[in-house]
Image: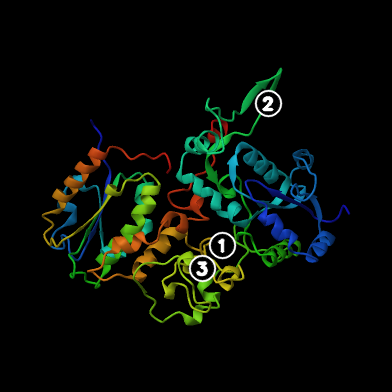
Amino acid sequence: MGEKPKVAICWLGACGGCDEAIVDLNEGLLDVAEAVSIEFWPVAMDYKYDHLAAFGKGEIAVGLVSGHVRNSEHAEVAHLLRDRCKLVIALGACACFGGTPALANLVSREEILDAVYVKAPSVVNPDGRLPQVETAWEEEILRLPAFFDHVYALNQVIEVDYYLPGCPPPSELIRNGVRAVLTDDLPPKGSTLAPRKALCETCPRNKTKPMRLEIHGPIRRIHEVEADPEMCFLAEGILCMGPATRSGCGETCIRSNTPCRGCFGPVPGVSDPGSRFISSLAALLKVGTTGDPEAVMASLGDPVGYLYRFTHPVSTLGARRLSQATEETP
Amino acid sequence: MGYKPKLVCFSCKFGWAYLRDMNALGEDVEFLTPVECSGRLDALHLLKAFKERADGVLILACEEGHCHFQEGNFRTLKMLYLLRDVLEAHGIEKARVRIEFSLDPEGRKILGRIARMKESLSALGPLNRALL
């Protein structure tokens, strides 16, 4: 058993969907277990952080890490994984770009604590007590992880070798990624283990896209209309992030008659998919000089939530690095 | 007192000051950037300006119907409507971005427009960068 490469699978600020995608390998998981030795996987089995800490530096061949970094526990475990794993792969949209929970970056830490622990309708907290990092209790000090004021993508905390995006990443992509590691058939470090094309190029509806794509009138959102199951969403005036999003997802959403929400992140060379999409959307919208562009734009509802749904921490305005100073005084 | 807002100004080369040496406009226009068309501006240019500590952005575009590239000025206006929501969500007030449509071959209005924008930025005070 000792010769098999060791693998650690870990979640930080994650929902467990990425681990579920690994389980979705089904029988393929047996092949993986045959080829590697899974040494750490807290979601699936009873592992403690001490198990991970007991390994030597770089002793684990690959660490598959899902989830963003929001508190001191996430940061500590991320650093521990970085030290013990030779390769770190960011698994899923949260680890790669911060993911949906990172929309919380649009409000302050104080507002979040107030909403959750004081103002929530189901909470009775007249003294306004908030979670403390340290609490004295019967001669003991109880400790909780410190809650940071920002959600970070994994590469803003530790060095990441490869990226497997998606919410969750398709099992096929994970299988190919693991295979590439095992056979040492890897692209340069820092690469995303997914195709380089934009989703539109692989979209089954691409053939219905008119040669000159234009959106007339208000922008429609998918829950407001009954979308044609064959037609390009943008051609119908329905917002779809396909042009600004990397392909490789298997077009699951598109096949379920749901437009792309951008969980695969930007195409190579684009740092801020939201702003890129704004510029292209402005060009597509034909409101006429006598029309009211403000009303048409307002029909978008929540542009920030839509355009930066998965990528806020890596966007131009949202990007930050977690410094040692921030870790100490969150 | 003493607060001097940092203003980044993008001006269209086809409509603004094309008969004038831009460098001669004086030191008050520290961040004046002539562009081939206001439609050349990407949302990213504005986001980067704010990230790099600008307090406001002024865009000098051609008058309606006078865009050398048909509708670059109108495209930028549409882009701004979307972008303003993004900026506001980050605590950047809508008034910190302004677009002016006019034609000014000799660039006589530029200093005045910049001064006016700086005045309203001074009234707003420094940008709250808590979410940036």
Residue A46 occupies quadrant:
top right
| Quarter of the image where the C terminus of chain A is located | top right
Residue A272 in view in this figure = no
Residue B122 location in percent, x, y? 23, 39
Q: Nearer the viewer, mark 2 or mark 1?
A: 2
Left or right: residue A175 compared with residue B3 = right
Q: Nearer the viewer, mark 1 or mark 3?
A: 3
Residue A34 location in percent, x, y? 84, 61
Q: Closest to the observer: A265 or A196?
A: A265
**Residue A142 circle label:** 2
Residue A141 occupies quadrant:
top right
Subunit of mark 3? A
Q: What residue would you read off at disc 1?
A: A264
Residue at image coords 61%, 37%: A72
Whether marks 2 and 3 lie on the same chain: yes
Left or right: residue B109 compared with residue A232 = left
The answer to which of marks 1 and 3 sits earlier in the sequence is 3
